[in-house]
Amino acid sequence: MSETPKTEARRTQGWMGIHRGHNARPLEWLAEKGILVVSLTAIVMVFLIFAFVTREALPLLLGQMNSAARQAVIPVADLDKIPPEKLRAYLELTPEQFKAMDRDTKELLMQTKVDAAKEAPEDKDAGVNTTEWRYLLLPHQWTGYDRPSYIWQPVSTIKKYNLVPLIVGSIKATFVALLFAVPLALAAAIYVSQLSRPQYKEIIKPAIELLSGIPSVVVGFFALIVMATVLQKIFGYESRLNAFVAGIALGFAIIPVVFSIAEDSLTSVPRSFTQAALALGASRWQAAWQVVLPAALPGVFAAVVLGFGRAMGETMIVLLASGNASIMSWNLFDSTRTITATIAAEMGEVVAGGDHYRILFLIGAMLFVVTFFSNMAAVLVMDRLKKRLEGKT
């Protein structure tokens, strides 16, 4: 049966209305483009931040810094004999600063270096450039120590910038946080999504998710004042503030993150999976544990990885509750110091462009890279898990 001309005209008009884009729906088109711009801006900002951090750490990465307390000095009388570029590097100035500086100021800076060289310690380590990678990552037997040691001591006559104590401290706090938070968050997610009554779910889920609204400084302060004392009385360790306390406090901060994503993943599993398991005689717990959880494994793994990133990047909690002692120890009950706490505590006191300043930007870039590659690894693992569950491998 053929369509009437009127019906055909309406169909054509409707088709044209769908495909006219911003001419037919300008507000929707503007909203779509606005969302696209915001998304791209966020991505660009992340890369710009990484580029800025890397740029500040670049002189250190290229081996252009020298933190030795005793260095060769150039006499002030030789000012006119030195090539400008060499003089600029010697005075540790940027090209803009060097160009804007007059001769008298350059002489004053050279005289300052001469005076500093006279006061340099006679220690054999005074000539060591502690910003070299072997001193940043490997142990060194410093004067006064009976064996090679990993030492972070940026404020001293001979500056020591070994990064290993900070890396170990971050790993310890994060490990405790995941060990404490992940089982609790996953158990709560399984209960809320699969086992609880609807009226309980309406109370438990918002209550757990509201924990993410508590400022981290409040959690850190609670850990500092209350939790540290309680845990010390229970376990009887010596250091009141340590990686264990910081990790437990971090766990409270990442529980809402892991719970929310894991619960959404478990809820998104088709109900037919549970119904089929129950029809075969399984209990609700067996259906949740043996059927639903494996089906939601990619999402659960993503929740754990995001919890890891949250724990690694947290600052205020570990700054208040870890003890902030850069001790090279794998003991969870020793005071420790993390990368983020180091940046927060020391960045405000460093000289811009100095060795300490560059080191802090270096560990910031390292933290960014670790988080980025952990997320990339998580994406690859989740993709393999999805393909395995779908029977494609």
Image: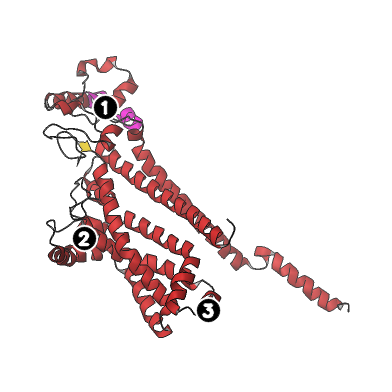
Q: What is the spatial separation of the Cα atoms under label 1 and label 3, in whole angstroms?
A: 79 Å
Query: Mark 2 is on which residue type?
Result: Val
Q: Earlier in the sequence, mark 1 or mark 2?
A: 1
Measured along the vertical axis of the image, is residue 393 above or below residue 160?
A: below
- Which residue position holds label 2? 245
Nearer mark to the viewer, of 2 and 3: 3
Q: Earlier in the sequence, mark 2 or mark 3?
A: 2
Q: Does dot 3 land on a helix, a strand or a loop?
A: loop
Q: Residue at x 34, y 33 (%)?
A: 59
Q: In which quadrant is the C terminus drawn?
A: bottom right
Magenta highlight: main SS: helix
Query: Mark 1 is on which residue type?
Result: Leu
Nearer mark to the viewer, of 1 and 2: 2
Measured along the vertical axis of the image, is residue 164 above or below residue 272?
A: above
Q: Earlier in the sequence, mark 1 or mark 3?
A: 1
Measured along the vertical axis of the image, is residue 145 above or below residue 388?
A: above
Q: Report which quarter residue 255 is drawn in.
A: bottom left
Query: Mark 3 is on which residue type?
Result: Leu
Q: What is the spatial separation of the Cα atoms under label 2 and label 3, in whole angstroms?
A: 46 Å
Q: Is residue 145 left or right of residue 339?
A: left
> Where is residue 38 drawn, in percent x and y?
50, 58
Q: Is residue 101 magenta?
A: yes
